[in-house]
């Protein structure tokens, strides 16, 4: 295949994906505005992707906080500012590391599973069977997963940040011997409501993106087992890149444009 043919195939593939995505979003928006919600399905998805992610979120937050505390302490000790480590760690976990790491962990754990599950349902014609039974697949399969991740991600992010903050507090004050009262006082003096709300807003957007990408790729999967595998792989790659890009853009909007 010559280079021109390859470029043409790539362009046509992106055009096909664009039309698929437009059709998917049209069906989704129509279903959200016109059809009823399946409350039981939303609670089930919260249990699966929210509560089910608690273990990995706690571990990720704890070890991220310990690693960040260790490296920050080494750097701040060189300039005699060990007491300010807590403020830097807390700000970083609330603004950046908490939302991003939680979102990446949920992408690896849940987004791949959603894409594989819906992809299997599509290739085995189970989604077509739902339509035959007059069940809207968007409101039954897609909407509950989107709402579940939008609701779950802020809570998972705050839990991850809390675990990191507590772990770093233990390491800095107990292991390295920094005064605990001074450490906590400087945290309270340097943390604002914007740090807290910024992380919550970021994580809600990340949850929406994770759910949207995974349901779209699963919903439009074709080609049997290989197609499901490709949909799962593309979901993880696209969602991860989108999270990192949106983290920067949302940081500009929230923390640069909004006064503290």
Image: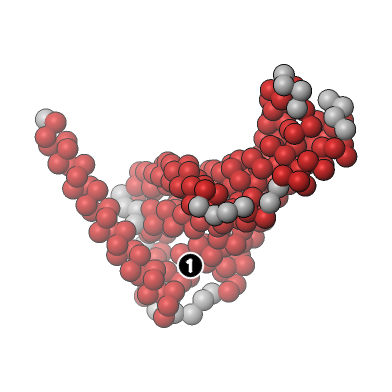
Taking depth in this image into account, of 61 and 220 the one nearest to the observer is 61
Name the residue rendered at 60%, 62% in the picture.
151
Taking depth in this image into account, of 222 and 186 the one nearest to the observer is 186
Say whether residue 229 is visible.
no
Give the residue at mark 1: 143
| Residue 163 position within the rendered picture, expressed as x and y whole percent measured from the top left | 74, 43
Q: Name the element at disc 1.
A: helix
The correct choice, above or below, for 132 with respect to 148 in the image is below
Taking depth in this image into account, of 103 and 229 the one nearest to the observer is 103
| Residue 142 position within the rendered picture, expressed as x and y whole percent measured from the top left | 46, 64
Name the residue rendered at 68%, 31% in the picture.
68
| Residue 28 position within the rendered picture, expressed as x and y whole percent measured from the top left | 39, 68
Quarter of the image holding residue 51?
Answer: bottom right
Apparent side of residue 177 relative to residue 186 in the rendered image (left or right): right
The correct choice, above or below, for 244 with respect to 131 in the image is above
Taking depth in this image into account, of 37 and 98 the one nearest to the observer is 98
Apparent side of residue 168 relative to residue 182 in the rendered image (left or right): left
| Residue 204 position within the rendered picture, expressed as x and y whole percent measured from the top left | 55, 57
């Amino acid at each position: 295949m010559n280079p021109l043919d390859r470029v043409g195939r790539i362009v046509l593939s992106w055009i096909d994906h664009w039309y698929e995505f437009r059709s998917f979003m049209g069906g989704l928006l129509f279903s959200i505005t016109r059809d009823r919600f399946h409350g039981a399905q939303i609670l089930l998805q919260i249990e699966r992707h929210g509560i089910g992610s608690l273990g990995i979120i706690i571990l990720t937050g704890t070890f991220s906080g310990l690693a960040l505390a260790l490296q920050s302490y080494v750097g701040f000790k060189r300039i005699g500012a060990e007491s300010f480590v807590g403020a830097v760690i807390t700000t970083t976990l609330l603004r950046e590391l908490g939302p991003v790491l939680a979102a990446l962990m949920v992408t690896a754990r849940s987004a791949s599973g959603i894409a594989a599950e819906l992809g299997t349902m599509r290739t085995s014609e189970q989604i077509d069977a739902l339509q035959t039974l007059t069940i809207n697949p968007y409101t039954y399969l897609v909407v509950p997963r989107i709402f579940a991740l939008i609701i779950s991600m802020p809570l998972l992010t705050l839990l991850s940040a809390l675990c990191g903050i507590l772990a770093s507090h233990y390491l800095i004050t107990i292991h390295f011997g920094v005064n605990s009262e001074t450490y906590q006082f400087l945290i309270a003096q340097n943390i604002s409501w914007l740090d807290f709300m910024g992380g919550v807003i970021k994580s809600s957007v990340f949850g929406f993106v994770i759910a949207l990408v995974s349901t779209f790729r699963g919903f439009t999967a074709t080609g049997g087992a290989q197609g499901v595998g490709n949909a799962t792989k593309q979901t993880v790659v696209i969602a991860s890149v989108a999270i990192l890009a949106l983290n920067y853009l949302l940081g500009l909007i929230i923390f640069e444009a909004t006064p503290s």
